[in-house]
Amino acid sequence: MNDWSGPVEEFLNFFRESERAYHMSEAEEQEAWAGVLDLYHDIELTEHTESELLTLCLRQKDFLQRRRRAKDLLQATAPLLAYIETHRKEIKELEQLLGEIRKAERRTENRIYTPRGGGGKP
């Protein structure tokens, strides 16, 4: 039996993963920006040695790079999220279709032939 449910499942998983990645990137971007602001406030309100300032600067660079990666992923996945939001009904219908295909595949998995009687003798 061919695996007809596999491609449909992969398609739906792509949408699920895109949505998950978008929301995780959204949280990562906010968290990284909060880290940058914390460092700004620390630099503003606390006296530091040059060595400490260098360490803070390197931490700031790390936060800014994390934020940039998150923003890039947000930008790449935003069109997918918009599509998902406007096509929720169709995606739900595809999930139901996947269930129907799987059910049909299960019914045919262990099929055996049962002779109808007589064995073909006259």
Image (cartoon, grey):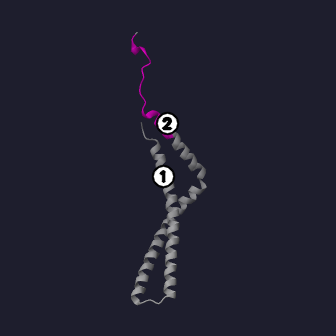
In which quarter of the view is residue 112 placed? top left
- Residue 26's spot in the image, x, y percent? 53, 67
- In front: 79, or 115? 115
- Residue 44's spot in the image, x, y percent? 51, 87
Residue extent of the magenta highlight = 101-121
Q: Where is 34 relative to 1, above or below?
A: below
Is 87 left, or right, of 56 in this rendering? Answer: right
Looking at marks 1 and 2 on the same chain, the residue that comes earlier in the sequence is marked by: 1
Secondary structure of residue under mark 2: helix
- Residue 28's spot in the image, x, y percent? 49, 68
- Distance between mark 1 and mark 2 Cα atoms: 20 Å
Residue sitting at 46 percent across and 75 percent down?
63
- Residue 40's spot in the image, x, y percent? 50, 83
Q: Is residue 116 magenta?
A: yes
Q: Is residue 87 magenta?
A: no
Q: Looking at the figure, which quarter contains the N terminus?
A: top left
Residue sitting at 39 percent across and 15 percent down?
119
Residue sitting at 54 percent across and 46 percent down?
95
The residue that mark 2 highlights is: 104
Secondary structure of residue under mark 1: helix
Q: Where is 57 relative to 105, above or below?
A: below
The residue that mark 1 highlights is: 13
For label 1, count other residues whose C-alpha is less than 10 Å away and answer few (under 14), some (14-19) or many (20+): few
Residue sitting at 60 percent across and 55 percent down?
86
